[in-house]
Image: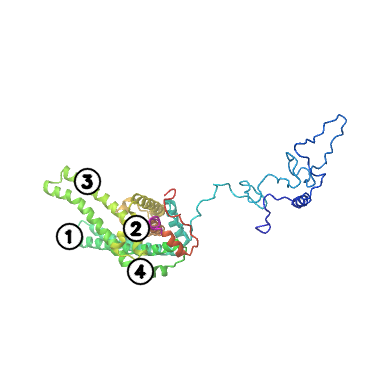
Amino acid sequence: MSDTPGWTSPGSDPSSEERKTGAAGAAEPTPSDTPPPPSEPTEPTAQPDDAPRNPDAKWAEGQPPPGQWSAPTGAPAPDQTPPPPPGAGWGGRPPAGSGGWGGPGPAAWGNGWGGPPPAAKPGVIPLRPLSIGEILDGAISTMRAYWRTVLGISLTVSVLVQLSLLLLQGVILKDTTSKLSDPDVSPGEALRSLGSITAGTALVGLVSVIGTIVATALLTTVTSRAVLGKQVGIGEAWRESRGQLLKLLGLLMLLGLITVVVLAVGMVPGLVLGAVAGFDAPAVALLVLGILAAVVVVIWLTIRFSLASPALMLERQGVLKSMTRSAKLVQGSWWRVLGVQFLAGIIANIVSALTVIPFTIIAFAVNGENMTSLLGTGGQPAGWSFLLITAVGSVIGGTLTLPIKAGVTVLLYIDQRIRREALDLELARAAGVQGSAPGTTPGPVPGS
């Protein structure tokens, strides 16, 4: 009997037909074949003149060829089949790692048997609780697998932000700096110059905020599709996310307002004491302690609400509801979320520095500027060539770092939902993965 075509069962040998013939012949014993009973010893007494025994003599008709099996310890009965050679027979397992016929055998017990099947991975991450390395790798894999969409979004935003900053530095700041450095400037001209600087800075900040909002919304959509292994273009990402842009703007404004209020509250006691009793040592110490305490609270709130943006975009929540969702997901994992975000920030800053610093050095070499000109502490403002070269470096740095930070935030949000809400099962169904293994969701994984 054979379970698989071309496969021979363990324990069989080429002489199986001979054993079948021998067994059939032994089914009808003759008187000469019947061994004597045990109570009547038949062992003859050795005689000195006996001739040597014939080595080819058989102890039974069904005996296999010499040397095929080991010699039995006793004479078998006529109706018994000779024992099979050592090894696994029907229903037995071959030794661990034995090749057998056709390849290596299975591993030993406990060496891969009984463990859970691997988690499905339809996209850039496996659908199970993620380690820190898998979150970072997922963000980079998204940028690599969807590079046209991801880099197209981040490049567009970076170009717009750097273009506005370039105009501010090359036109507004250059003109106003020259006027403010003139000792004969009138108070009215000085105020107008300061107003121009303020308006230009506000314009650059507004462009930066809008660009960040658009990039965050689009990259959130792209990363969520990358988890499912589905393709998405810039147009499709825009259509899916544009309905939440105003809510995302409101969320960022509210978070910024909370930051300002907390810092102001921390400074109030020191400022009040300084206004009443003078800014002596106690007032200054109280002011510094208040600022430090406010910074700690701001960091705590920032991490607590760090997952509000993907919650707002992917769950179609409102501003306050998304903040509540983020606080719920971060609860109990605050330090882990802080560590992942901090590590992602370090990686993004390193990548940005590695791209900006070489272009800055080239700008100094081409334009002949020195550090004094760069900082604006003396001499002439930086020229256009210097600004253009450094802007190119900043565009490249922003293009590479925006997807990393946005991708890590989205994958961290998905990881927290997998750990708390078994989102992996829902993602597996959405990705069309059949037979997802149960029991792989609970509990952290090594390195998480």
Residue at label 1? Answer: 187
Place of residue 375 in the rendered image (x, y in percent of width and height, measured from the top left): 30, 52
The nearer-to-camera label among 3 and 2 is 2
The nearer-to-camera label among 4 and 1 is 4
> Which residue in the rendered view is the most extreme toward the top?
48
Identify the secondary structure beneath mark 3. Answer: helix
Please, what is the three-letter code of the amino acid marked with disc 3?
Leu
Residue at label 2? Answer: 307
Q: Indicate which disc, 3 or 2, sits on the residue closer to the N terminus.
A: 3
* Inter-mark Cα distance, 3 to 1: 38 Å
Q: Are marks 4 and 3 in contact (CB under 8 Å)?
A: no
* Inter-mark Cα distance, 3 to 2: 29 Å
Identify the secondary structure beneath mark 4. Answer: helix
Residue at label 4? Answer: 242
Tell me which residue sits at (29%, 52%) in the image.
300
Q: Indicate which disc, 2 or 1, sits on the residue closer to the N terminus.
A: 1
* Depth order, front residue of 155/98: 98
Please, what is the three-letter code of the amino acid marked with disc 4?
Arg
Q: Indicate which disc, 4 or 1, sits on the residue closer to the N terminus.
A: 1
**Which segment is the magenta one?**
414-422
385 is within the stretch colored magenta: no
* Mark 4 crowd level (few <14, some 14–19, many ≥20, 10 Å Cα): some
Q: Which mark is residue 289?
A: 3
Identify the secondary structure beneath mark 1. Answer: helix
* Depth order, front residue of 437/144: 437
Q: Are marks 3 and 1 in contact (CB under 8 Å)?
A: no
Place of residue 162 in the rendered image (x, y in percent of width and height, measured from the top left): 35, 61
Please, what is the three-letter code of the amino acid marked with disc 1?
Pro
